[in-house]
Every structure is written in C-alpha cells, then in structure tokens.
Amino acid sequence: MKLTSLSDSELLDVVRPLAEHTEASWNDKDYQAFCRYLILEDVEQTFPEAEFQRQIAENYDIYGVHRIGELVAIHRNPDNVIVMWKVGFEKREAPGLLIYGFKEHEGEVRVAGCSYHA
C-alpha cells in the first residue's frame, strides 16, 4: 500500500482506527496499548513508561478524556502523512488540536508521532 497515494477517505479509513486506539489507550492510562502502533525500535528507550506516566500526571487532571473530533487537515509528504483533527476534552469546553503522523513501516501503517495542543 502506498499510504501517500490513498484518497482522503481511504486514508482516514486506515489511520483513524490507529488514532482512536492510541487516544483510548491514553484515556485508559495504558502504556502498553498506547505504544502498540507507534514506530519505535526500543519503546522503553524512545518513549519510556516513566515519560508516559509523567505526561498523564501532568495533563490528565486538567483535560480528562480526549475525544477525536472533526477533521481539520491532511498533509501528504513524500514518505508520511500528517492528519490533524480537533480534539475534545472532558474537562475543557474549547477544543484543541490533535496532530498525528503516519508512516509505512515494515509493510504496515504505523503512528510516527502524535501530540495535542490545547
């Protein structure tokens, strides 16, 4: 599959479930599940569980559960795709911006990175 050549609809059919899984894992505070679709050679070295727990402790009480909202934009690079959605927060009325990078890795589409901005 050539991720960058898919139509917007086809692309979202592939990547949205990965983002939904990752966000649900954040909401459940489940590090192992959160890392499931990330491109990481050595998860504990690249994104240690202690860093995940620090981010949860720093942000979860402020924002609560994340909910993927409406699509903002899709940006195609030669070797990856960036998808931006609005993100709703349980404890905040105003939405934020959820940014995911996706890339093909060893024949599968994986999350190359994710972040939210509130």
Image: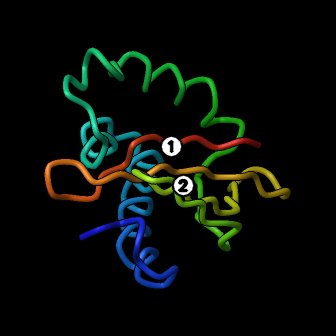
> Dot 1: few (<14), some (14–19), or many (≥20) neighbours within 10 Å?
some
Q: Quadrant of the N terminus?
A: bottom left
- Name the outermost residue toward the left: 106
User: What residue appears at the point 24 percent right and 46 percent down from the top-left corner?
Assistant: 36
Residue at 57% of width from left, 41% of height from top? 115
Q: Nearer the viewer, mark 2 or mark 1?
A: 2
> Image check: 78 left or right of 111?
right
Q: Name the one closer to the observer, 18 or 25.
A: 18
Q: Residue 12 placed where, x, y %? A: 46, 75
- N-terminal-most mark, 2 or 1: 2
Residue 104, image quadrant:
bottom left
Q: Which residue is mark 1?
A: 114
Mark 2 and mark 1 residues within 8 Å of each other at the beta carbon:
no
Q: Secondary structure at mark 2?
A: strand
Q: Quadrant of the C terminus?
A: top right
Residue type pointed to by label 2: Ile
